Amino acid sequence: MLADLHVFESGDMTLLDVPGPEAEAIAERLEQFHFAEQVEIAPPGALGSLWLHGPGAAELLTPLVHIT
């Protein structure tokens, strides 16, 4: 399996950001390696993503969400 992805670790959850058209196939492939762990592998469903890059990204985002 070859896939481009970004990995986000948030303590109790790890999110893999993958190209939308490939999400289902990647989830199915990862499920083949899932055994004996308390893990749920699922395509994102209603989750979406927005990427902001550059020196002004935080300033643009701050009024829209609560960032601590």
Image (cartoon, rainbow, N blue to C red):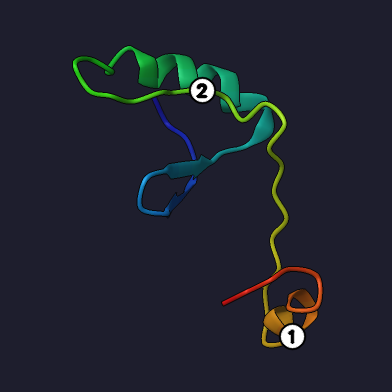
Residue 52 horizontal/vertical position (percent): 71, 68
Q: How many marks?
A: 2
- Point out the image quarter for the C terminus: bottom right
Asked if labels 1 and 2 touch by Cβ distance under 8 angstroms, the answer is no
Circle 2: residue type? Ala
Residue at image x 46%, y 14%? Answer: 28
Q: CA distance from mark 2 to mark 1?
A: 33 Å
* Residue 6 versus residue 63 in the image, above or below: above
Occupied quadrant, residue 41: top left
Q: Residue at x 67, y 26 (%)?
A: 45
Task: Say left or right for 7 vs 45.
Answer: left
Within-10-Å neighbours for mark 2: few <14, some 14–19, many 20+: few
Amino acid type, residue under disc 1 in the picture = Glu
Q: Residue at x 73, y 78 (%)?
A: 62
* 40, above or below 6, in the image: above
Q: Nearer the viewer, residue 36 or 7?
A: 36
Given residues 51 and 68, the one toward you in this image is 68
User: Seen in the image, is 47 located left or right of residue 5?
Assistant: right
Helix or strand or loop: what does disc 2 sit on? loop
The residue that appears at 75% across and 74% down in the rendered structure is: 61
Q: Which mark is residue 20?
A: none
On the image, numbered disc 1 is attached to which residue? Answer: 59
Give residue 57's position: percent from left, percent from top. 71, 79
Report which quarter residue 24 is drawn in: top right
Q: Position of residue 59 (x, y in %)?
A: 74, 85
List x then y, in percent, for residue 30. 37, 21
Q: Quadrant of the N terminus?
A: top left
As helix, strand or loop, the secondary structure at mark 1 comes to: helix
Can you identify the residue that label 2 sits on?
42
